[in-house]
Image (cartoon, grey):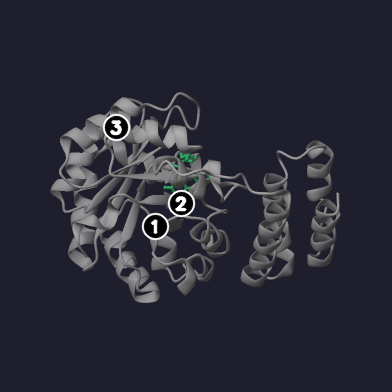
Amino acid sequence: MDNTFFKGKLILAPMAGISNSAFREICRDFGADMSVGEMVSAKALWYGDKKSTQLLHTTEAEQPVIPQIFGSDPEIMASSAKKVLELTGAPAIDINMGCPVHKVISGGDGSALMKNPDLIFDIVKAVTGAVDVPVTVKIRAGFEKINAVECALSAESAGAAAITVHGRTRTQMYAPPVNLDIIAQVKEAVGIPVIGNGDVKDGKSAKEMLEKTGCDSIMVGRAALGNPFVFEEIKAYLSGQPYEKPSLSLIMDTARRHVHALVSLKGERIGILEARGQLAWYIRDIRGGAALRAQATKVSTLNEADEFINSIHNK
Ligand SMILES: Cc1cc2nc3c(=O)[nH]c(=O)nc-3n(C[C@H](O)[C@H](O)[C@H](O)COP(=O)(O)O)c2cc1C
């Protein structure tokens, strides 16, 4: 793979419980150039956990998809990375070093790795030694203190091919502001491509991310929830093209496609449970949204979801 693979790209962020195959395919159709899959536990994969393996499901239409693993034992990470690539044939693999949730960091995984740049080196070294595709890492600004540059250099010297920086510390979780300076400092320090992440929600904020950090690619997460159109909007803005907001009809057709894809992927019971939240996001900006969102949280079959979507279509 050449060095341009991680440059000039608009990437759907990994979001556990959200950026599954169903959503990734839709985002790809609306302009995302690639995506990173939901985090999967290296340890669980190592033990052969079926649910974790299912999280790796991808389709042809959504390629390229980069699977992401989390963990902190270099050997287990290396062996799981190999397994992931055997199962998916993915063009690269990403290592989660940014997850802030307690359950993950209490095991020393996710963003807790940023407390130990030497361990970052060992993990990346072990994984790059085990697989023959590019290995990327996704970090935050730091855990408590800001040390993204040190962690990025550590990952780079161990062979990482690109690095995503979410410009917030673990302590900040998702609280504003996002620190674009630290992304710029990482870009200045390393020679590998840097992917800027955090609060990119439209064309203007994407341009700001590019200009203020000099990053090579942009990753978008929460702004795509119920709004996969955001990728087209950003691309239009960055290339100076006019952009027309999606019609209600397109929004609801996309919501229907998403719900049906979730049901195909997960079966009706789980698919519909997950679809409730997605539906609420699609209708967040329409008039009477609050009452409709309450209704969305009650749909319990695919038929009910279709009827709910039809009722908005016909408004
Ligand atoms: C619900 C949710 C789940 C997430 N899951 C993951 C994950 O599995 N792996 C990961 O590296 N980051 C995960 N993130 C972090 C996002 O990838 C991204 O770094 C963060 O949301 C900031 O980007 P944004 O402002 O564009 O949303 C998650 C974020 C959210 C909101």
| Residue at figure coordinates x 69%, y 71% from the top left | 267
Viewer-nearest of discs 1 and 3: 3
Number of callouts: 3
Earlier in the chain: of badge 1 and badge 2, it is 2
Q: Looking at the rendering, in which quadrant would you find the N terminus? A: bottom left
State if disc 2 and disc 1 touch (CB < 8 Å): yes
Three-letter residue code for mark 3? Thr
Sequence-wise first label, 1 or 3: 1
Ligand 1: does it lie within 8 Å of the C-beta at label 2? yes
Residue 300 found in image quarter: bottom right
Q: Which residue is mark 2?
A: 14
Real-space Cα distance between discs 1 and 2? 8 Å
- Which residue in the structure is indicated by mark 1? 68
Disc number at residue 191? none
Q: Residue at x 29, y 32 (%)?
A: 213
Callout 1: SS: strand
Q: Earlier in the sequence, mark 2 or mark 3?
A: 2
Residue 213 marker: 3
